[in-house]
Image: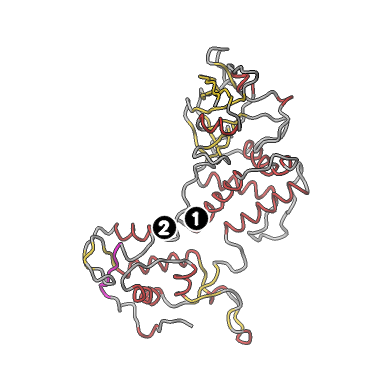
Amino acid sequence: MSRIDPENFSPSSFGDATVCEECFGDEDLTERIQAYETSGECSYCEEEREHVAPFHDNAEFIGERMGEFYGRAADQLPYDTREGGYQGRHEDTYDCLLESIGLAINSEQSELLADDLVSEIGDDTWCDYDWLSLEMDESLQSSWDQFCGATKGQRRFFFHHIGEPETNHPDERSIFGFLNELATLIEARGLVRTLPEGTSFYRARANEDGGGWSTALELGPPPAEVSLQSNRMNPPGIPMFYGAGTPELAVAETRQVDVTIGKFETNRPIRVVDLANLPPVPGFFSEATREQLQTLAFLHRLSEIMAQPVAQNNRVNVDYIPTQIVTEYLRDHEFAEGRIDGISYVTAVGSHSFNTVLFATRENVIDNFGLAVGESRWLVLTDTEVCSG
């Protein structure tokens, strides 16, 4: 039951009422009020404020945002008087705004402001945006979970039609369909980035018998025939170049103290999928679309999952399979400007830096003083440092 009686209000009831930058505990709404660049008395704090804005404009915007993320029960849900009304989760405007969305109201007259917002927006009955589908971030997460389950325990090499949907329901994707949607999403969110020539990456290798390492071949990727370890992004037998963003992280990744650090620099621009520096997830009261907000939320969750430590036991050969497949798919995907050279991802060792896996082998690295740099030699070892703890 609503706590607001709509008959006591009308769209003109609030006249010239204003709200100030301190009325709401939401950064986006605060910035929106500040953008009016108007000072005056706040109708709800009853004090002179540096920034105030028309109450009606802000209530209208808040109502529009609710409509961006929630549906109206009258349009969405079946109704059965014998079963108690709407058949599905639903709530009134007050509960949706203050409880589900969690709008924080800081005004001295917070209850009055909340009631006025409900009256201005309309005391409607709200439900899920589409009661027959998952939210986009939840839908993508579900597909990721299915992808992991299938590639770990069902199919590994030929899975294009595994999970092939029988309908056009948005929550049903084949494994191949999910990978394609993930690549499309990565490009749509601007995560394919060009790094300039001269970008640095650091690799560390444990020293042996007190001696250090000094060449690109010694500090670069291992030969294919001895690349027998299953790693986060590459399976055994397929070497790749793992580079850290800082020397400290390179050392931390080895879990050793007596190491040689090699600094490699690119001698051409490279393109990477950057999952380490994702844009922040926009707030509910930003101007981001529902798709932008929810798909970025999923990408943040995926980045965290990909960074989770994996126990270095017999399970590692299985638990790394999903990220290895994603890496291989993205490696060959034709993005708008062509294929990529690597993927940057969040580290699992607690550093503020990040790692990048580059699709480079021993044929792509060179010593600064070595052979003439050709088109295939695009990672140059420019410096080394021996560290012993």
| Mark number, residue 371 | none
24 with respect to 318 (left or right)? left
Measured as percent of width and height from the top left, residue 99 is found at: 47, 70
Location of residue 33 by image quarter: bottom left
96 with respect to 217 (left or right)? left
Location of residue 255 by image quarter: top right
| Mark number, residue 293 | 1
**Amino acid type indicated by mark 1:** Leu
Measured as percent of width and height from the top left, residue 18 is found at: 27, 69
Mark 1 element type: helix
Q: Which residue is drawn at 47% across and 74% down?
A: 95
- Classed neighbour count for the residue bearing mark 2: other residues with Cα under 10 Å, few (<14), some (14–19), many (≥20): some
In the image, is residue 253 part of the stretch drawn in magenta? Answer: no
Asked if marks 2 and 1 touch (Cβ < 8 Å), the reply is yes
**Amino acid type indicated by mark 2:** Ser
Measured as percent of width and height from the top left, residue 345 is found at: 56, 40
> Would you place residue 10 above or below residue 35 in this image?
below
Location of residue 65 by image quarter: bottom left
Mark 2 element type: loop
Q: Which residue is drawn at 61% across and 23% down?
A: 220
Q: Residue at x 65, y 18 (%)?
A: 209
Q: Mark 2 highlights which residue?
A: 286
> Would you place residue 372 above or below residue 143 in this image?
above
Single out the residue that lies furthest toward the right.
154
Q: Which residue is drawn at 56% across and 12% down?
A: 370
Q: How is the image coloured?
A: secondary structure
Region rendered in magenta: 15-21
